[in-house]
Amino acid sequence: MPFPVLPVSIQTMMIKQQQGTTIYYPQVIGLQNANVQQSINQSIYQLVHSLIQWQSEQQGTDSFTEMIGSFEIKTNERNILSLSLTNYAYAYHHAHGLTLMKSLTFDVQTGMQYQLSDLFKPGSNYVEVLSKMVQTQINERDLQLLSDFSGISPDQDFYIADKALVLYFQLYEITPYYIGFPMFPISVFAIQDIINENGPLGQMAVNN
């Protein structure tokens, strides 16, 4: 029997700065390759701080009455780790707070961090294929848009959850604030003809 591919161990870390700021983020522990572990953890830590900086840029201030960071592990199997980091911040004199979200997907054996294009075969025209699928879901769900949907970007935000690729947009990006993060799950089996079989979606499509 082949040795089972086990989930990686995750440790929750915390950043506590001024009053009202508490940020939880994950770090991988126990990997056999220390360099890979360090690379993955550094990427996560850098994104945590990028979200803090992004809040300041988006809201035009460094003064927040509250800032809360959290994370969700979306996939942790078959040597693939996909996670999302969120950062909520409420600035003085603003009508409401703002939540930002970004995601990371890694191969925990090599430390490779995947971009959306890495998930698909070269020349597969994945942007057009996925854009049509998102447009179909917009129509089926009767989602209110701020303007006509022009398609996803080549580096669209995404994460992998079970056997689905989940594409998402930031608040205000394509929909009104009250809708939250518009998310579009796409089954790996619906795009099996264009996915990179050696990439993370290829791993998810295997039935064992």
Image (spheres, rainbow, N blue to C red):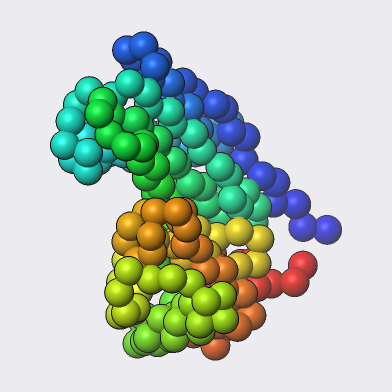
User: Residue sitting at 51 percent across and 82 percent down?
Assistant: 139
In the image, residue 170 lies at what x, y percent? 37, 56
Q: Camera-side residue: 84 or 5?
A: 84
Query: Could you say which quadrant of the image residue 185 lies in?
Result: bottom right
Q: Is residue 3 left or right of residue 62?
A: right
Is the N terminus in the top left, top right, bottom left or bottom right quadrant? Answer: bottom right
| Location of residue 194 with respect to 36 vertically, above or below | below
| Location of residue 161 with respect to 125 vertically, above or below | above
User: Residue sitting at 34 percent across and 78 percent down?
Assistant: 149
Q: Camera-side residue: 119 or 47?
A: 47
In the image, residue 45 lies at what x, y percent? 36, 33
Query: Could you say which quadrant of the image residue 207 lies in?
Result: bottom right
Q: Is residue 16 visible?
A: yes
Q: Is residue 49 visible?
A: no
Total numbered badges shown on the rendered structure: 0
In the image, residue 59 lies at what x, y percent? 22, 38
In the image, residue 156 lies at what x, y percent? 36, 65
Q: Residue furthest top?
A: 19
Q: Is residue 92 left or right of residue 34?
A: left
User: Residue sitting at 40 percent across and 35 percent down?
Assistant: 88
Is the C terminus in the top left, top right, bottom left or bottom right quadrant? Answer: bottom right
User: Residue sitting at 46 percent across and 37 percent down?
Assistant: 37
Q: Camera-side residue: 147 or 173?
A: 147
Q: Camera-side residue: 176 or 54?
A: 176
